[in-house]
Amino acid sequence: MTSDSAIDSRVQVLLIDDDAHLRQALSQTLDLAGLKVLSLGDAQGLAQRIPASWPGVVVSDIRMPGIDGLELLNQLRERDPELPVLLITGHGDVPLAVQAMRAGAYDFLEKPFANDALLGSVRRALDRRRLVLDNRSLRLALTDRQQLAGRLVGQSPAMQRLREQIGALAGIATDVLILGETGAGKEVVARALHDLSSRRDGPFVAINAGALAESVVESELFGHEAGAFTGAQKRRIGKFEFANGGTLFLDEIESMSLDVQVKLLRLLQERMVERLGGNQLIPLDIRVIAATKEDLRQAADAGRFRADLYYRLNVAPLTIPALRERGEDALLLFQHFSESAATRHGLSVRELQPGQRALLLRHPWPGNVRELQNAAERFALGLELALDSNAPNLPPVSGGLSEQVEAFERALIAGELSRPHGSLRSLAEALGLPRKTLHDKLRKHGLNFSGAGGSSPEDFD
């Protein structure tokens, strides 16, 4: 074997036999049956070349120089115990073949055998392989969904859509642009995209472009050769090259200079990097996930961001909703973070009181999830739940439970009305209510909506 490259996933049958004439005859039989075949004269290094989810089957002679069929079977079962291996035996090798079946071989064929016997066994093995891989895929998808729900906590429609989008994009090789306010969880989303992708075993390299000094940003990203500039005493591998085979997360991309943006655009188009002071183009196999808190289209119109780079990045955008748009997700997240902090510090879990819950729901969360996590940490440590909020305070409530519920509901709606909403539709989504229900509650509590765009008949559909 002359190549160390991985077996093409389109290959359905790997045929290994040191007898060139028999190998050619069997290859023709399989090929005429419409099967894509790769035939090899020996099994040296073969097990390491088969990907974990390769959809094919292996057909191998038992008696071969070097690695024989039994040794190959053992190597393949170490990598994937469910990969079908069919063994070809001579008359005297039947006891060995029976031993191999007990060790996990799928089938064996004793020479001479009819072509139909070979084709029937191969097709049954392929059907079994497809079933195994389908079951694996279903189990992996279920695990991924559970893992994603644990990372991105929330039941609001916006968060459910975000998780669906991440699940759809994770397995695709395209680059991604994440849009979200400060503290919304852009790196959490980027990490989820990486961990749910086929690159999960490769490196995940995160870099904040806004935290890099202008003088070192190119060296950090692209690397440099020794002597490339004053102080460059030895070669440095840049972040893009270091992330080869995995994912590079580039946060605050809007802070990059126009000169660096040109180099980034070239790298994204050519998938090659050139170190500063070097002449060699280094091929890259990476996925780039960029993130920004700004509207890059507006930045491009203003000349602060290259329009061609914006369009190159904006193929698969993901928008993370602000916490103030996620309704009762704030309570779920607060409980999640406070319980985690209490467990970490060995403290008892504190229970939120009704007034504290109302305060969390009314708070505009300018720092989003990061701000909420800090508040939950303080709460878990026994400190007062004090938030800097411009929302109106809840009025003192007296009377029975129904009166208190009515007053609480009115205060929550009034608090949301104090925030900017361009339409009644937006207000309804923020409160997690159908628009007709919201309309009824506004009339019931004597509240008026006066958004920037006013309301329209379709707002009540």
Image: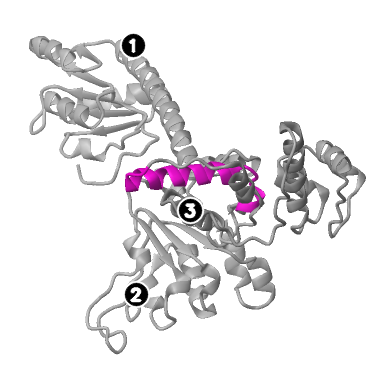
User: Going 63% across and 70% down the picture, which residue do you hit?
Assistant: 307
Viewer-nearest of labels 2 and 1? 2
Magenta residue span: 323-347
What's the amino acid at mark 3?
Gln
Q: Give residue 116's mark.
A: 1
| Residue tagged 3 | 373
Expressed as whole percent of the image width and height from the top left, the position of residue 369 reads: 53, 54
Q: Nearer the viewer, residue 431 or 52?
A: 431
What's the amino acid at mark 2?
Arg
Pointer 2 local density, CA inside 10 Å: few below 14, some 14–19, many at least 20? many
Residue 5 inside the magenta-drawn segment:
no
Quadrant location of the C terminus in the rendered image: top right
What's the amino acid at mark 1?
Asp
Viewer-nearest of labels 3 and 1? 3
Q: Answer whether residue 338 is visible to the viewer in this image.
A: yes
Q: Give residue 275's mark.
A: 2
How far apart marks 2 and 3 lie (CA) works out to 40 Å
User: Going 35% across and 79% down the picture, which residue do you hit?
Assistant: 276
